[in-house]
Image (cartoon, coloured by chain):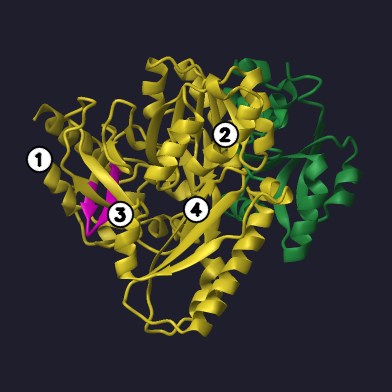
Chain colours: A yellow, B green
Amino acid sequence: MQQQDNTVDALQEVIDFAYHNECSWYVDFWRQQGLLCKPRIETVADVTQLPMVTKKDFVISGHPLNYTFVPLANVLSFRSTSGTTGKELFVFPRGSFSPDVRTILVQNGARSFLYLGGVHKNAATTFDYLSLGMQVITADVHQLNKTPKLVIDHQVDTISSTPTSLLLMAPLLAQRQCVNMIRHIVIYGELLTEDMHTQIQEHYPQANIYTEYSLSESGQGIAYTTPACDLDINCYHSHESAYCEIVAGELVITTLTKPHPLPLIRYRTGDAARWRDHKCSCGLQSSQVFELTGRKNVDVVKVGGLELRYSALEKSLQQLPPTIVIDSISATAGVNKDNQISIHLYVALSVETKITAAIASTLIQEVVQDYWLLTQTKSLSHYIANQKCLPPVIHLVNKAEQVALKRVGIKLITDS
Amino acid sequence: MVSDYVSTDLQKYFQAHTIVRPVCLSDPDSELALVFQATCYKLHIPGSHGTIYNLAWTQKFFTLLEPDCLVIDFSIIAGLNSYLEKIGVQLTCAHLICVGAQLETEVSVACPQIQYQNYQYVTFPYATAR
């Protein structure tokens, strides 16, 4: 009950912050949506009086200063989303450090943190985390072969990365006999499979595995797991600094950190989720647990930090008969015993449909070609140059097959 | 420490010209990226970064953000110019700061696609950053 009272207060404070700010973006947006006066939040359910907001609502506002809620002196940098929620470039202000799973990592002894993430964000992150007493080393996902030297030189004990990049990096670290230096791993950015999780634990035997769910534009962690959790794969505890709702199967968040350069109030994440009723063994009872099940829209597939955009597939997909609706696209990647990358791309159909052999063949060929071109210019180029990446395997799957795939940890169904 | 990376040259320039929204374009793991960020951090101005690995993204980011100063490594100017030429876009910025090219003519010849009013050559990070 105490927790809920705190959340109610925090929600009211965020709304007050948005309402009485020099930046009137939310007030204008809410008025346009028919909300003429400030809502009073007495229970968490009252937050539903507010209309939901999407990335597009911000994007059409033009310059990011139109939705910057703090003075420029309090903005650390302007950044942009990585593209997983659509084609538009969403540029937004980021402030200084907000609480996330790294706070817990520091409490558990992490000191030297290697961040393998979006290249344009790295330098801005470096100094931000000094306030935690944590050294941050920025690595480049495009040059994984440089990583072992960074790990050794900086005595890295913690790596934050996508699962695919972790698996790609593991043989390189093992080769330099530094893989056992890694005591903590933070996984983010891709849906995990049981198999990937097992592989990561095998490759990094000394590491405790944390997972984090976050959005670039939120500027903070939204949900996480720690090694003490016994939650299923892709299940997370919501962070106390974010209020999560699931509306029509979609995760909707409100950031409770303040002052926030861009408070997200009832922000539609585009991620499909469902609540899970599970008492976690970590003992954290106050937090809600949700399971991410995929994307609500087909717009991008992520493999190891590599983004395969829907636009790249559009031409191929348009060749399908109009009666066929693509429900979702997902991908997995792994490293086999010969250190070859094997990528599987799953195109899930929302209706039971027979695809003629000719259509399937054209589709697969074009998708492979698009995908192959992308991989050559992006993060897997190092491996492709060394002929270690196998041509991707494309699977067209119907509903029944989705269910079967789900049993083995590959989740494609986004709306149910 | 942050102060180890602050460039006095860059700091002075930003202060003298009241720069409030600079963007840096360099190799992400370069010292320039860190120097730029540390200096912005000290001056309490947003320090935003483009990426050399996705120039299409960088061009869109730059166009949308309308920075008042571009800090760029000379070694990547030719590649950027080639891309901008290919897509027929010119970037406009009041201030251009370049590391690695002492003469303005080197930059104007190498990158006619960037239009600027003021040019500054700085020697950091290798000479003055520490």
**Three-letter amino acid code at the position of disc 4:** Lys
Which callout, 4 or 2, points to the residue nearer the camera?
A: 2
Look at mark 1 in the image and give the residue it sits on. Answer: A42
Residue A254 painted magenta: yes
Q: Position of residue A32 (x, y in %)?
A: 28, 62
Q: Chain of mark 2?
A: A
Other residues around mark 3 within 10 Å, as few (<14) / some (14–19) / many (≥20): few
Quarter of the N terminus of chain A within the rendering: top left
Q: Are marks 1 and 3 in contact (CB under 8 Å)?
A: no
State the count of labels: 4
Say which label, 3 or 2, has the lower sequence index: 2
Does residue A53 sit above or below A100 in this rendering?
A: below
Judging by the rendered image, the residue that carries numbered circle 2 is A170
Q: Quadrant of the C terminus of chain A?
A: bottom left
Q: Is residue A20 above or below residue B108?
A: above
Q: Earlier in the sequence, mark 4 or mark 1?
A: 1
Q: Any mark on residue A407, and which?
A: 3
Tags 3 and 2 in contact by the CB under 8 Å rule?
no
Label 1 – label 3 distance at C-alpha: 42 Å
Q: CA distance from mark 4 to mark 1?
A: 40 Å
Sequence-wise first label, 1 or 3: 1
Q: What span is colored magenta in the figure? A: A245-255
Q: Which residue is mark 4?
A: A302
